């Protein structure tokens, strides 16, 4: 029994990649309810960056972590800064702060051309949310609305640089930061799209831990720009924090999925002893070379299984398994269902 239990756990490098496909954990708390108030001419890029973090958080876990709702001030149609009309779910009047469907987080989405005058109904909603101890957030110059409501008094906030002078002149009780993002216990503010993503990732990490955020980053930052201005995929073999020899070993493994190399062969290619190779994997990846290789192959098989219509037998061969029976046993050990069941579940979803 202990051997089967061990097989169900990926090492940390590949656990995040596969987390959404692992057996569901026992039901925990209800999803966090997040509401976005879209001001006219709001920044589409900042809004989608924040929403993308939440949506991806739901995708990398087997149960939803967040629900997302949007609100327009007067109408369910809101013009963005790109002159594209966005359909919000509700108007501000319907924004719930009490009862079973009350929001947990209220995010005000501003933009470069948003009006900086106070909207009385929004201020009333934000003051009520503050009294109800909801988390309040502002994107771009969304912090201006929070400041009008008095929820930033005595606090520091981030806001787009174009609005610094206005905010400092108008709100003497609020400290305007030169940082792109400021996160307090129940208040989060940011100055633009990149910091909007980071702000939401910080909130997600507080709620659900670093593993969830690592999985989100793996998806959203897969093509981030390296220091040498070369765009590289964020694969483990490209991780500059790992020793060069280990990265070479990972490249060899990735290039030899269908016909896996033996550990002695891998060691020979990089001119290291088998013991040295095993130490590298244990020190930096907290697993053995053979274990990591198996996890790599089963991950590749899971992708092919759910992203193609190829037969299970062909996928088994393509991923270096001796037979479809052996592949099915390994797959069920990791994911709790057989390959055919996993494919059926994905299609029904």
Image (spheres, rainbow, N blue to C red):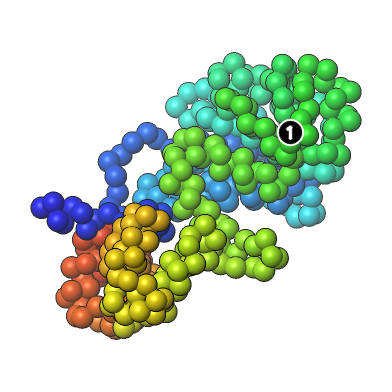
In x, y percent, where is residue 150? 72, 18
Q: Is residue 75 something one can see in this rendering? A: no
Residue at point 64% right, 50% down? Answer: 48
Query: On the image, which quarter does residue 113 sit in?
Result: top right
- Describe the element under mark 1 as helix, strand or loop: loop
Above or below 312: residue 291: above
Quadrant housing the C terminus: bottom left
Q: Residue furthest left?
A: 1
- Closer to us: 65 or 298: 298
Above or below 175: residue 322: below
Residue at point 21% right, 67% down? Answer: 330
- Closer to us: 158 or 264: 264
In x, y percent, where is residue 1? 10, 52
236 left or right, relative to 115: left
User: How busy is the neighbourhood of tag 1: few (under 14 within 10 Å), some, or many (20 plus)?
Assistant: many
In x, y percent, where is residue 217? 53, 53
Question: Badge 1 is on which residue?
Answer: 158
Counting every numbered tag in the picture gives 1
In x, y percent, where is residue 84? 75, 55
- Closer to us: 156 or 133: 156
Query: On the image, which quarter does residue 22 sit in?
Result: bottom left
Above or below 299: residue 4: above
160 left or right, relative to 252: right
Above or below 317: residue 220: above
305 left or right, relative to 6: right
Q: Is residue 23 something one can see in this rendering? A: yes
Residue at point 21% right, 71% down? Answer: 328
312 left or right, relative to 162: left
């Amino acid at each position: 029994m202990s051997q089967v239990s061990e097989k169900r756990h990926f090492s940390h490098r590949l656990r995040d990649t596969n987390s959404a496909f692992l057996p569901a954990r026992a039901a925990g708390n209800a999803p966090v309810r997040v509401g976005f108030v879209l001001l006219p001419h709001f920044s589409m890029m900042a809004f989608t960056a924040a929403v993308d973090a939440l949506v991806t958080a739901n995708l990398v876990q087997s149960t939803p972590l967040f629900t997302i709702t949007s609100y327009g001030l007067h109408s369910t149609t809101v013009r963005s800064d790109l002159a594209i009309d966005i359909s919000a779910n509700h108007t501000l009047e319907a924004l719930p702060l009490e009862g079973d469907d009350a929001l947990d987080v209220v995010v005000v989405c501003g933009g470069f051309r948003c009006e900086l005058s106070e909207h009385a109904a929004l201020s009333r909603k934000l003051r009520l949310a503050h009294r109800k101890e909801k988390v309040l957030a502002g994107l771009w110059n969304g912090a201006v609305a929070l400041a009008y409501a008095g929820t930033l008094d005595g606090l520091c906030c981030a806001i787009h640089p174009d609005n610094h002078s206005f905010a400092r002149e108008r709100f003497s009780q609020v400290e305007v930061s030169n940082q792109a993002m400021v996160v307090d216990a129940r208040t989060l503010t940011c100055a633009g799209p990149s910091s909007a993503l980071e702000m939401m990732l910080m909130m997600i990490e507080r709620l659900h831990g670093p593993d969830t955020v690592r999985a989100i980053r793996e998806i959203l930052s897969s093509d981030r720009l390296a220091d040498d201005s070369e765009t590289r995929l964020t694969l483990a073999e490209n991780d500059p924090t790992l020793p060069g020899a280990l990265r070479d070993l990972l490249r060899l493994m990735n290039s030899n999925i269908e016909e896996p190399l033996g550990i002695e062969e891998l060691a020979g290619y990089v001119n290291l002893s088998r013991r040295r190779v095993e130490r590298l994997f244990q020190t930096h990846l907290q697993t053995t070379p053979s274990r990591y290789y198996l996890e790599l192959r089963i991950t590749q098989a899971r992708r092919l299984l759910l992203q193609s219509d190829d037969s299970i037998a062909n996928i088994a061969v393509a991923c270096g398994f001796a037979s479809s029976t052996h592949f099915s046993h390994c797959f069920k050990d990791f994911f709790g269902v057989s390959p055919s069941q996993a494919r059926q579940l994905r299609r029904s979803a």
